[in-house]
Amino acid sequence: EDQVTQSPEALRLQEGESSSLNCSYTVSGLRGLFWYRQDPGKGPEFLFTLYSAGEEKEKERLKATLTKKESFLHITAPKPEDSATYLCAVQGGAGGTSYGKLTFGQGTILTVHP
Amino acid sequence: DTGVSQDPRHKITKRGQNVTFRCDPISEHNRLYWYRQTLGQGPEFLTYFQNEAQLEKSRLLSDRFSAERPKGSFSTLEIQRTEQGDSAMYLCASIGGEGDRIFGSGTRLTVV
């Protein structure tokens, strides 16, 4: 069974203080690792998909990296508007029967103070 | 279409009542998913449709839950005889050919 663990559960930063969020996973046949941002009362907003170890993707102040066991979401010089819950999810492919369903971690709640 | 649409946004119901939620995916997206999310947790997979065919159901989906996608466009999720444990955010997502998974804003269900 696919499993995803995110750490820390909550992270408080000062504006401009860079940091990283961790996503550790176990999956049979990784087909994709996904990062989402979720604001209170809203659905997850897609950020990145990573497919293989060594891959990196960037968007504004966010950069996602992937190894065979974990992914990191690096936040450079964050702003208060980056405050949200960040979710990591994996799509496994064991036996080709996953039909694309995602297994999510519990999320990291990021708060950026001005 | 600008995104995945879910209706209603909020639903309060008494224990034992039946409720139905609707999801309108992005047009031409042939794959549609339902997830459930409780406070402080990530979304959990419930069921998956490709066009009108329901191809996979989670063990979380008890026999009180039923989902349909009759014409391969919108989908409905019905919960019969609601229980307090059913209180959660119910999320719908659709996927296009490029693989981007787009979520709706969800339906917040409160069972009192």
Image: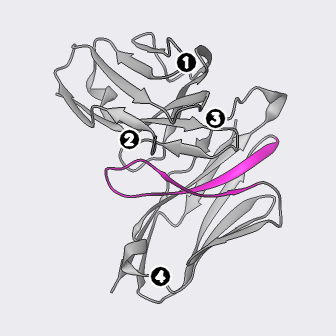
> Contact, CB < 8 Å: mark 3 with mark 1?
no
Residue A19: percent from left, percent from top: 55, 81
Residue indicated by mark 3: A101
Using the image, name the chain to which the residue with label 2 belongs: B
Q: Nearer the viewer, mark 3 or mark 1?
A: 1
Residue indicated by mark 1: B72
> Contact, CB < 8 Å: mark 3 with mark 4?
no
Amino acid of disc 1: Gly
Residue indicated by mark 4: A78
> Contact, CB < 8 Å: mark 3 with mark 2?
no
Q: Nearer the viewer, mark 1 or mark 2?
A: 1
Under tag 2, what secondary structure? loop
Disc 4 versus disc 2: distance between alpha carbons?
Answer: 27 Å
Disc 1 versus disc 2: distance between alpha carbons?
Answer: 28 Å
Residue B107: percent from left, percent from top: 32, 35
For label 2, the crowd category at 10 Å Cα-Cα, with few meaning under 14, some 14 to 19 and many 20 or more, is some
Using the image, name the chain to which the residue with label 4 belongs: A
Q: Please report the residue visible at 31 percent of the width from the left and 50 percent of the height from the top.
A: A41
Q: Is residue A94 above or below residue B81?
A: below
Residue A45: percent from left, percent from top: 49, 54
| Span colored in magenta | A29-50
Amino acid of disc 4: Pro
Q: Nearer the viewer, mark 1 or mark 4?
A: 1
Do tags 1 and 2 sit on the same chain? yes
Left or right of A45, for residue B85: left
Under tag 3, what secondary structure? loop
Left or right of B107, for residue A63: right
Do tags 3 and 1 sit on the same chain? no
> Contact, CB < 8 Å: mark 4 with mark 2?
no
